[in-house]
Image: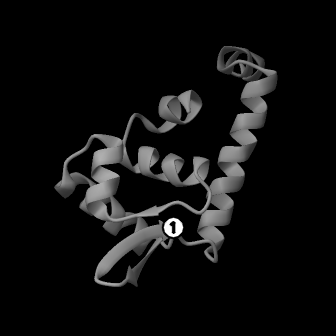
């Protein structure tokens, strides 16, 4: 999402959050996430650890695999997804340049 990248940069954190936001019910292991995002395993592991610690993601075991999923029970996740949803709605009606000009 272009506006989030303008605000927060093209960070792997943003890419991971948007992956889960745009794909309801999605879950994957670290290796799968790394391949999906075309990032190194080490980078994705660090980002996932940060987001688990923040309460945005959670980890569960399926068989012998540890998979990552969105933490739907977290108030932080709800607030974050509400924010992303609001940004999407604003983007549909006005460009970022129009929003910035209106605030100046």
Frontmost residue, 26 versus 16? 26
Q: Camera-side residue: 40 or 49? A: 40
Q: Position of residue 67 (x, y in %)?
A: 38, 72
Residue at screen point 82% across, 23% down: 93
Query: Where in the figure is residue 21, as x and y percent of width and height?
Result: 59, 52
Density class for disc 1 (Cα within 10 Å; few <14, some 14-19, many ≥20) is many
Q: Residue at x 35, y 63 (%)?
A: 48
Q: Is residue 79 left or right of residue 94?
A: left
Q: Position of residue 35 (x, y in %)?
A: 28, 47
Task: Relative to 99, say whether 29 is above or below.
Answer: below
Q: Residue at x 30, y 77 (%)?
A: 65
Helix, strand, or loop for circle 1? loop
- Look at the picture and state if 93 lies above or below 85: above
* Place of residue 77 in the rendered image (x, y in percent of width and height, measured from the top left): 60, 65
Residue, far right: 93
**Left or right of 48, for residue 5:** right
> What residue did someone put label 1 on?
56
**Viewer-side residue, 27 vs 49:** 27
Which residue is at a point 25% across and 44% down the rendered structure image? 39
- Report the number of numbered marks: 1
88 vs 66, left or right, is: right
């Amino acid at each position: 999402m272009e506006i989030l990248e303008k605000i927060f940069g093209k960070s792997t954190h943003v890419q991971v959050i948007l992956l889960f936001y745009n794909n309801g019910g999605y879950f994957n292991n670290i290796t799968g996430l790394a391949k999906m995002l075309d990032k190194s395993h080490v980078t994705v592991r660090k980002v996932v650890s940060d987001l688990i610690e923040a309460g945005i993601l959670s980890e569960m075991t399926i068989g012998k695999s540890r998979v990552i999923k969105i933490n739907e029970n977290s108030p932080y996740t709800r607030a974050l997804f509400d924010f992303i949803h609001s940004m999407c709605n604003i983007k549909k009606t006005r460009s970022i340049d129009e929003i910035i000009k209106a605030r100046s």
